Image: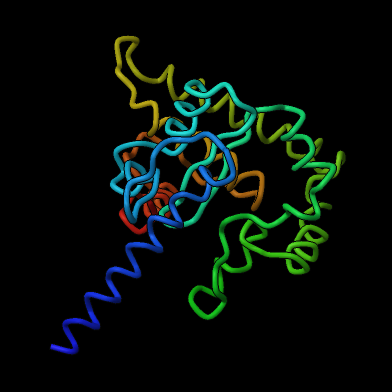
Amino acid sequence: MFLIALLLGALTLFYIWLKWNYSYWKRNNVPGPEPTYFVGNVGSTLNMSENFGIVASNWYKTYSEPYVGYYKMLRPAIVLRDPDLIREVLITNFNSFRNNDVNISKRFDPLSATNPFANQDDEWKESRKTISPMFSQSKLKGILPMMNEVGADFVKFIKSHPSDTDFNAKELSNRFTTENVIKSTFSIEPGCFKKEEQNEFLKAGEDLFKPTFWVG
């Protein structure tokens, strides 16, 4: 009996905390959609029925205020609508907002943890020093001819099919993007515009970005 009472007490306290947690934006007079317990306002992205870009776009169109408060599951988050406010966050106060949401544990995934977009604070600064020279004006000028070649190969690939061919836009984009990235980064020919349905590079990219519950 004592254990049941303890469990009921714990559940009641958790429910009270949940209600209090989901009132964060209301307490701060920030407009936003009503959250659903446990998934907040991102339930449709977790079950892969909507892309977050579409969800955020709907909020952007629905509200007229400079910002919209929502919940990433249990955590309060915010969408900025005002260009001046966005500029403040991204430029003026960048030191306070430099970390991305993605923070991968080196113990869990040591390879992905080196991704500069997943690094935090000082690690991000070091990563930025490493990758910035790759995007210098001279380097980009060197990459441009390769990208032009990829564009020409892309046109040839489409023209090699009958004029009434239906293309899958996502599959075409995968071929174009993969060919560009591999050729520009490693200076090798990945062969993404050959007529075979798949090659190793396309398959690796498809596996990497395959939508799953955990990716969501």
Q: Residue at x 32, y 14 (%)?
A: 162
Identify which residue, 132 or 24, lies in the foreground. Answer: 24
Question: 33 left or right of 136?
Answer: left
- Residue 151 placement (x, y as % from top left): 59, 26
Residue ranking furthest to the left? 1
Which picture quadrant has residue 208? bottom left
Instruction: Please give the count of numbered marks on the rendered protein.
Output: 0
Is residue 170 visible in this depiction of the protein? yes
Image point 27% across, 76% down: which residue? 9
Of residues 105 and 82, which is closer to you in this image?
A: 82
Quarter of image, res 194: top left
Q: Is residue 115 left or right of residue 71?
A: right
**Towards the viewer: 20 or 142:** 20
Q: Residue at x 35, y 52 (%)?
A: 39
Name the image colouring: rainbow
Q: Residue 106, located in which quarter of the rendered image? A: bottom right
Residue 102: image x %, image y %?
56, 59
Taking the spot 64% from the left edge, 28% from the top edge, the residue there is 66
Image height of 80 relative to 38, above or below: above
- Quadrant containing the N terminus in the rendered view: bottom left
| Observer able to see residue 193 | no
Q: Residue furthest bottom?
A: 2
209 sits to left or right of 152:
left
Where 60 sits versus 93, above or below? Answer: above
Q: Position of residue 96 (x, y in %)?
A: 77, 55
Image coords of residue 159 (percent x, y)? 43, 17
> 61 above or below 130?
above
